[in-house]
């Protein structure tokens, strides 16, 4: 059992790393089998048999509950903690008590503060946009703060009443319109949380030579939380990446002090030097702009709730959740869980019809994270050529001009063949 380790922020990946995987519920077993077949072929081919992933199954969700009585056994968390990098299929959310969500539990336990979602279009995939080829973004969504922290109280409970008494009595808050029937939620946003998220996003932009980083927020209304995110984000860029980026806050300062022409000259010089241009935009305008001028955006850093809306809209612009990959990462400890972004799709489970691309593309992200880019690129090329020929699972093929619907297993075989050629 060879373990992936991390030293000073750099992963050390052995030739045959152990990678824990959660098969998942519903369509989970089908998409996981497909993903493993495709990844094993790509790794074997790319490195002439010298590298291999040692898959080790760990349990979570319905399968775990049936076998162990626990939805998320300690051994599973321990495996992800020990081996750093893992992958998971979709998990059903326990209904009626138990934990709120297994995904949230995993994120919290391992402090996976970045939810990473790359969004790109593949030729051939139907899109509601006229020019979907212009969409190529990577979303860094903060995973541990904001109203998703789950600090809220239901209207009419003693806790909600107590909280309101504190607000009105001690904090002098008079703005709650209907205090008796109000539920309350708290939205913590910290400098530390913002800095580590923006640092990761900027690092990614610099390493991948991407043109810009956009801080998306509602700081015009929520001045200290969302506005704090914007300001701390700019500060992180200016203090930690001074030679690698140029911020539009500096641009505005230069324009005020030395005139617009001087600011424009500095911006052009930064672009010419290949620096990452850091800007910010209000979340509602951003959602509109992504439809009208998606080419203006590259790396996105945003808070949890905004990130939730943004991820789904952008995924829909390039073909939907069936092909949207994702990961939850702590770049400091190295812990990373790559995951299918769709649910368990109970309506098609067991029918060999599920689209495995969300999980396969998540595995591509995993291989990139491990530095095994040759294998990652081989899989991406195979998916590109398959879609370009109209060969896809039914959910995508039915909207393609030259669509030819394949079962999960036939689509997998087609990718494996294409990679092996
Ligand atoms: P869902 O994503 O499972 O299904 C929504 C629709 O998309 C269905 O029509 C389904 O057939 C289709 N679909 C989903 N994945 C597909 C794929 N790979 N290929 C082709 N079609 C696909 O969402 P739903 O029905 O709201 O949730 C079902 C269960 O999944 C619930 O228990 C929910 O809590 C859980 N869930 C888990 C997630 C995760 O583990 N990351 C994410 C979302 C939901």
Image (cartoon, helix red, strand yellow):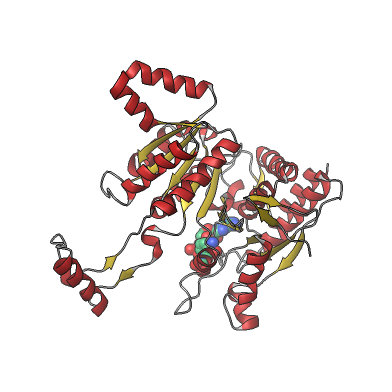
Q: At 55% from the left edge and 33% from the top edge, which residue is drawn?
A: 210
Rendering coords of residue 197 (x, y %): 48, 49
Q: Is residue 207 visible?
A: yes
In the depicted structure, whether residue 373 falls above or below residue 89: above
Rendering coords of residue 297 (x, y %): 47, 35
Q: At 78% from the left edge and 44% from the top edge, which residue is drawn?
A: 419
Rendering coords of residue 216 (x, y %): 39, 43
Residue closer to the observer: 81 or 126: 81
Side of 304 relative to 105 (left or right): left
Q: Quadrant of residue 261?
A: top left
Side of 314 relative to 47 (left or right): left
Side of 249 relative to 7 (left or right): left
In the depicted structure, whether residue 62 falls above or below residue 258: below
Residue closer to the observer: 285 or 3: 3
Rendering coords of residue 353 (x, y %): 64, 58
Q: Is residue 23 visible?
A: no
């Amino acid at each position: 059992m060879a373990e992936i380790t991390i030293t000073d922020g750099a992963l050390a990946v052995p030739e045959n790393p152990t990678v824990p995987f959660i098969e998942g519920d519903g369509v989970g077993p089908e998409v996981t089998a497909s993903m493993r077949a495709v990844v094993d072929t790509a790794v074997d081919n790319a490195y002439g048999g010298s590298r291999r992933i040692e898959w080790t199954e760990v349990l979570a969700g319905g399968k775990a509950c049936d076998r162990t009585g626990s939805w998320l056994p300690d051994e599973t968390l321990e495996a992800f903690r020990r081996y750093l990098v893992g992958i998971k299929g979709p998990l059903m959310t326990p209904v009626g008590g138990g934990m709120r969500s297994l995904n949230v539990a995993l994120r919290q336990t391992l402090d996976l503060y970045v939810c990473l979602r790359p969004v790109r279009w593949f030729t051939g995939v139907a899109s509601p946009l006229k020019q979907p080829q212009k969409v190529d973004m990577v979303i860094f969504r903060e995973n541990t703060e904001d109203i998703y922290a789950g600090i809220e109280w239901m209207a009419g409970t003693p806790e909600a009443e107590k909280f309101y008494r504190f607000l009105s009595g001690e904090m002098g808050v008079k703005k709650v319109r209907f205090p008796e029937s109000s539920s309350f939620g708290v939205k913590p946003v910290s400098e530390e949380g913002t800095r580590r998220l923006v640092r990761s996003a900027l690092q990614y932009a610099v390493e991948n030579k991407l043109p810009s980083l956009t801080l998306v927020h509602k700081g015009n209304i929520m001045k200290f939380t969302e506005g704090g995110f914007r300001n701390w984000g700019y500060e992180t860029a200016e203090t930690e990446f001074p030679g690698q980026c140029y911020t539009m806050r500096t641009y505005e300062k230069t324009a005020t002090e030395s005139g617009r022409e001087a600011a424009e000259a500095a911006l052009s010089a930064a672009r010419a030097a290949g620096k990452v241009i850091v800007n910010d935009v209000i979340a509602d305008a951003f959602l509109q702009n992504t439809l009208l001028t998606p080419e203006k955006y590259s790396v996105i850093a945003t808070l949890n709730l905004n990130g939730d809306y943004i991820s789904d809209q952008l995924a829909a612009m390039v073909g939907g959740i069936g092909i949207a990959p994702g990961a939850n990462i702590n770049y400091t400890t190295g812990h990373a869980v790559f995951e299918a972004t769709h649910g368990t799709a109970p309506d098609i489970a067991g029918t060999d019809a599920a689209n495995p691309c969300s999980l396969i593309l998540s595995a591509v992200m995993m291989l990139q994270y491990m530095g095994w880019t040759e294998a990652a690129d081989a899989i991406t090329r195979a998916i590109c050529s398959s879609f370009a020929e109209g060969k896809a699972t039914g959910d995508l093929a039915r909207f393609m001009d030259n669509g030819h619907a394949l079962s999960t297993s036939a689509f997998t075989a087609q990718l494996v063949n294409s990679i092996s050629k």
